[in-house]
Amino acid sequence: MSCPILPGSTIGVLGSGQLGRMFAIAARRLGYRVHVFSPDDDTPTGQVADVEIQAAYDDLDAVARFAGQVDAVTFEFENVPAGTIEVVDKVVPVRPGGQVLHTTQHRLREKSFLRSMGIPTTPFRAIRALSDLEPLGADDFPAILKTAAWGYDGKGQVKIDAPAGAASAWSQLDCDEAVLEQFVEFKAELSVVAVRGQDGSFAAYGPIENRHRNHILDVSITPTDLAPSVAAEAVEMARSIVEQLDVVGVLCVEFFLTHDDGLLVNELAPRPHNSGHLTIDAHVSCQFEQQVRSICGLPLGATTQLRPAAMVNLLGDVWQGGEPDWSQALAIEDVKLHLYGKREPRVGRKMGHLTALAETSEAAVKRGLAARQALLGAEVPVSAAIDPS
Ligand code: AMP
């Protein structure tokens, strides 16, 4: 095992969004310096990093210069080109490693990997031309056609209800390779945020329950009222996945929970995840601190939860009536506000989140939703603002 990368060292981050920002805040709290590399400037990560480098991911000279100034590199955005990672890897360790990115940035590779491990996934088949869709019958639908690469938050996905919809879905996606997944009538969506240290140590948060709106995460809640055996099974699946992929870092496993309490893995994200944002306020060590600890070869922190919590996303939609009235949400007890420093509040864009803590998960959700509602200038019903439990 290599020596730990100690506080005072410099960590490089590929990608400059909110995940990098919260990583950089955790890293700086632990005494590290942070350099961020992305094609943009004045970014959520750049605003809190020591150095912000603006260059294209395929500008390999700039990538090599960036790698030469740091002690290790991690990423907050998994669609970084493989060639960029190779260049960095020749200079300093990239964690998680390039093989993790290679598997998880392509849905077919990811699902085939999970299938080869015997992990249950949504039934799927590879689609490389319209002729792969044409022989399918009514029993194969409803289904979702997803691009194999570059998809996130429901982008690059089309639902097909019947064979007649296949041709227009294929032309709408406009890609060379896709995966057709059976549409799952799930009972709930869950995630486990897993962490694996350089010495093989393991820690996990969750399961966390995730509620989506328009394919974008809306609310995350933990603890859940899942049967303990199902919760343990989800964590064990996450453990086998990070061990098999040899992850050093954080990886989120997203699941569908079926009506008979079966677990199907929907997808993997080789980094901290939106559903784990509540760990900042609700757990002893948050997912971003764990990313720092794991990639630097330090002992992992405790994942003990201090209080039930709910995270409520703030999308650009919240700005539709003008700048939200922040004091309205901040006035609600045990609600924490996180904003990502993005200038343009576009509809559907993740601008920030609220975490609400309470005595029960249900009360935390109620409080978090009331706080978001209050941002829009609406009156907060007293029953929602004050935790009845
Ligand atoms: P993804 O980008 O694959 O995580 O999809 C975003 C969201 O779309 C998921 O969190 C689900 O809410 C929904 N979704 C994706 N795939 C399926 C599926 N096979 N069946 C039902 N809903 C799905």
Image: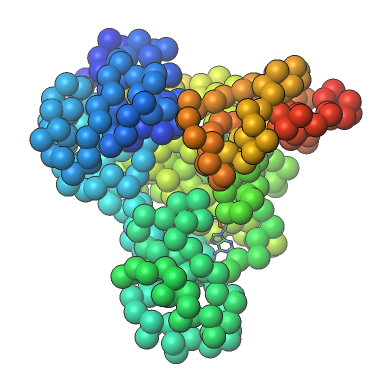
Is 196 located above or below residue 34 in the figure?
below
Q: Residue at x 20, y 31 (%)?
A: 93
Q: Is residue 385 left or right of residue 170?
A: right
Q: Is residue 156 left or right of residue 70?
A: right
Q: Quadrant of ligand 1?
A: bottom right
Q: Nearer the viewer, residue 49 or 55?
A: 55
User: Percent from the top left, x then y, of residue 48?
Assistant: 39, 18
Q: Residue at x 69, y 40 (%)?
A: 224
Image quadrant occupied by the C terminus: top right
Outermost residue, front side: 322
Image quadrant occupied by the N terminus: top left
Q: Residue 257, located in which quarter of the rendered image?
A: bottom right
Is 279 located above or below residue 178 in the figure?
above
Q: Nearer the viewer, residue 78 or 298?
A: 78
Q: Residue 335, located in which quarter of the rendered image?
A: top right
Q: Residue 251, located in which quarter of the rendered image?
A: top left
User: Percent from the top left, x then y, of residue 242?
Assistant: 39, 44
User: Percent from the top left, x then y, of residue 296?
Assistant: 30, 23
Q: Residue at x 82, y 25 (%)?
A: 385
Q: Is residue 12 left or right of residue 215?
A: left
The answer, for residue 199, to whether it is visible in the render is no
User: Percent from the top left, x then y, of residue 174?
Assistant: 37, 69
Is 115 located above or below residue 24 in the figure?
below
Is 161 located above or below residue 318 in the figure?
below
The answer, for residue 39, to whether it is visible in the render is yes
